[in-house]
Image (cartoon, rainbow, N blue to C red):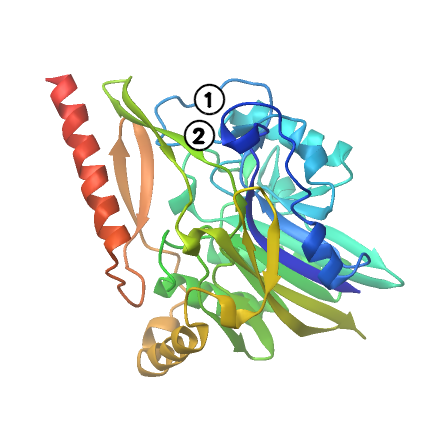
Amino acid sequence: MKLAFVGDVYLSGKGGGFGGPDTRHDIFAALQAKVGPSTFLVGNVESALTDREDANPYKWASLCSDPAVAQRLKALAVGCIANNHAGDAGWQGLRDTMLHLQEAGIQPVGCGSNIDEALAPCILSQDGTRVALVALCCLTTNGECVATYTQPGVAPVSVDNLRMAVARGRLEAETVIVLVHWGCEQTHYPVPDQIRLGRIAIDAGAAAVIGCHAHVIQTFEEYHGGWIFHGLGNFFFDPVRARAVSGRKAVAEFDIDHKDPRNRESLVPTFEVRRNQLKLTDLILTRWENDGRIAVGGLKDATVDLNAANAYLRRWARFRWSKLQSEGEIGFRCILRNGTVKYDYDGTPIRREWRSRELGARVYRRANRLLAEAFRG
């Protein structure tokens, strides 16, 4: 059995992102030609596939796609919806998303009508080989659509839930792969809790951990015979309509278009399972162009020097090993913004990256907050 994992996928269902029919190319064609038609593709579906209205008009950015988008995703064998946007149209929209994926022949994973269903594994089977996929979402990326024992939503990541999900997967398959939505955006480096949780998952019996959310490629490492990818980056991401809100009123709307080359690339790890052993067979880099075509290359084409980034990760882990020994839960800070609960990590990425883009984004966010305050006043 062969598997390939792609990063965040958001298709709005509108040509160019905001208008006109969507007549773009098959975004998976080039990758399928590279890995072969029998390879199972797994991707993070970063939007609600529904006709329902945005359930939270006060959120910074809500991603709701035309249900027809599911047919554009048919190359995927599994669609992970344990993320911070699959629930943007509420539980009904999340249920629509699961239904539309299933109708397109895609198995959804990572959500359910309660936490037990959300943590249930998705099974891929071929020629007697079975692989279990489980998916969880960090509270920092979704504090409002989290499944509990009495509430539907996406599976929240915690040390206990992580171990429970891996154990459940191992009851149905020898090989378990964990999909996790976590980390800080726009940085190539993980926060300490990402490193720690990834290792906990491997120690619990997972063969690999695949992360998403940062919108850029992050570091990866081999640990105790398993692989941990902290972030795959964006495989394909349409422009996003965002809003600044003050006093329950939208005071400014603007577009976020991923023009930075870092936001247009995805690391695609490919694996082969033989005799219940997972082996990393290739690391592919993909990048999308404005017309929707996906270019396929190697790590040398990445905008980040992954060898240097991974070396920094190894040095950090060697000299700060004590931070990775804790089995406690993730530390969060709670912030109430426009009536919306937002969680941030207590810690920061293991390395700060001061880029003009990040500094510009900070100035931009500050200007929007000042604009909102001026309208409120």
Residue 149 visible (yes or no): no
| Element class at badge 1 | loop
Of the pair 291 and 313, the residue shown nearer to us: 291
Of the pair 311 and 26, the residue shown nearer to us: 26
Give the Cα distance between marks 1 and 2.
9 Å
Q: Quadrant of the C terminus?
A: top left
Residue 329 shows which numbered tag?
none
Please identify, in this view, whether the residue under mark 1 or under mark 2 is nearer the observer.
Answer: 2
Left or right of 21: which side holds 35?
A: right
In this figure, which residue is indicated by the disc labeled 1? 55
Work out which residue is located at the far right of the displayed protein and give it.
127
Residue at 40% in and 55% down: 183
Left or right of 18: which side holds 177?
A: right
Q: How far across and down, in percent of the image, does residue 309 sit?
A: 39, 73
Residue at 68% in and 40% down: 73
Which kind of residue does numbered mark 2 sit on? Ser
Q: Quadrant of residue 13?
A: top right
Q: How far across and down, in percent of the image, does residue 282 sit?
A: 65, 72
Residue at 45% in and 68% down: 219
**Marked residue nearer the N-terminal end (1 or 2):** 1
Residue 190 visible (yes or no): yes
| Element class at badge 2 | loop
In this figure, which residue is indicated by the disc labeled 2? 62
Callouts 1 and 2 close, C-beta under 8 Å: yes
User: Height in image: 77 above or below 306?
Assistant: above
Q: How far across and down, in percent of the image, does residue 40 sit?
A: 75, 56
Q: How far across and down, in percent of the image, does residue 80 sit?
A: 61, 46
User: Height in image: 226 above or below 348?
Assistant: below
Which kind of residue does numbered mark 1 sit on? Ala
Mark 1 closeness class: few <14, some 14–19, many ≥20 residues within 10 Å: some
Mark 2 closeness class: few <14, some 14–19, many ≥20 residues within 10 Å: many
